[in-house]
Image (tube, rainbow, N blue to C red):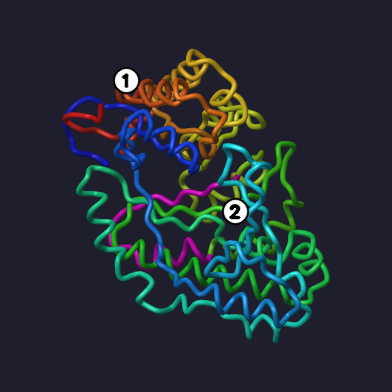
Amino acid sequence: MLSGKGPHHLPLDVWMTGPSADMVERHTGIRNEAEALGLSVERIGPRYPNNQREWRKAYREIGFKVAPDAEVGSTGTVHDVPPAASVGAAYHLLEMRHPIGLVTRIEQLEKLPWPDVDSPDMYRHIPGEVAAVQARGRAAIGQMDCTAFEMTWYVRGMDNVYLDLTDGNGISDWLLDWYTHRAEVAVRHYAAAGADVIWLGDDVGTQRGMMMAVDFWREHLKPRLKRVIDAAHAAQTAPFWVAYHSDGDVRQIIPDLIEIGVEVLNPVQPECMPVVPTINEYRDRLAFWGMVGTQTTMPFGMPYNVQLAVDELRELAESGARIIVGPTHAIEPDVPWENLEMLVREAKRPLYPAPVGAHTSRPHWIHEEEEGPS
């Protein structure tokens, strides 16, 4: 992300929902948010096959009926489309179903039409896409969020996953291992292609703390996450950052994440994690990505409140903390254009870092360019 010339400013990332992309296009004439807003990053991912016909057939055979207009993902997820009148402008909101909750034996899992994630065909485009993103002056993110736990409960149901892992019946272990393997293969391709960021994540926090006992997370999820991180490093051809996303308050496991190789935490959710104390506690061991609240500041604040939130992050960055500015999650239809516009404008104001040695050296990943996006 470094050209070595021009002013320093805070790197910027914004996640879009369909309705928010519509809003950006109305105001800028550009559908692509990276171009329209001058973002510092772009995301890439595998190209898994569209095999929903096979999944629909397989689900019928285990007794689950998929609605004709349901969205069926390449790795078994199913989302029903609600009536338009019930979601209004939030047309992207879907109802998740858990068809593999009907499975009672591992043999049934093995017969499902899982894509061949080991096939090179899924990843042939990745080197070219990484190079193209970097040629545009942005960091290439190899996307593998919902690494294992979330995908497992998406298809199995969260209650069933907890029961499976407690009872030891092997069903959710099989699913966790399959999705972990999927992630291992993908991150090896990202790392080999020279991606700048390996993006992992599973939501394991609530706004009152972890959604499971920490020992439970350490037993079932931490080793699998470490496998994925290790796979990326084994294929590394250039430096990259390992980023981990979880909503909620995950302070109990931050030391564990650092231990297994996580270098960037996304987000620090201000509604449940104090931004400045959390960043100051771990600033010498972590970078931080996305701290402007999407439950509070972005939808319900005034532009001035957005400005204050970014200014707080600016002060941290100027004192040596490694910061990428962005909302804590995707921009939803309740976010006014004026707030998004302020977020972008404030992130792009020049930084004036403290002299080297005042706290830490200037973060080398702060985006620098001769002429930044307008």
Which x, y percent locates residue 278?
Answer: 58, 31
Q: Residue at x 63, y 85 (%)?
A: 111
Q: Which mark is residue 97?
A: none
353 in magenta:
no
- In the structure shown, which secondary structural element does the residue marked by tag 1 occupy? loop
Which x, y percent locates residue 214?
Answer: 72, 51
Which x, y percent locates residue 294?
Answer: 57, 31
Image quarter for residue 149?
Answer: bottom right
The amino acid pointed to by label 2 is: Asp
Pick the front one: 159 or 214: 159
* Few, some or many residues within 10 Å of mark 2 (<14, 14–19, 20+): some
Q: Up-down: is 152 above or below 107?
A: above
Q: Earlier in the sequence, mark 2 or mark 1?
A: 2
Mark 2 vs 1: CB contact within 8 A: no
* Few, some or many residues within 10 Å of mark 1 (<14, 14–19, 20+): some
Q: Up-down: is 116 above or below 84?
A: below
The amino acid pointed to by label 1 is: Arg
Q: Give the labeled residue for mark 2.
A: 202
> Looking at the rendering, in which quadrant would you find the N terminus?
top left
- In the structure shown, which secondary structural element does the residue marked by tag 2 occupy? loop
Q: Report whether 31 appears left or right of 145.
A: left
How far apart are the two marked residues, 2 and 1, measured between alpha carbons? Answer: 32 Å
> Looking at the rendering, in which quadrant would you find the C terminus?
top left
Q: Report whether 206 appears left or right of 342.
A: right
The reply to whether residue 7 is visible in this rendering is yes
Q: Residue at x 60, y 72 (%)?
A: 177
Q: Residue at x 22, y 25 (%)?
A: 7
Q: Which region of the structure is painted magenta?
A: 227-246
Q: Residue furthest top?
A: 304
Q: Give the labeled residue for mark 1.
A: 349
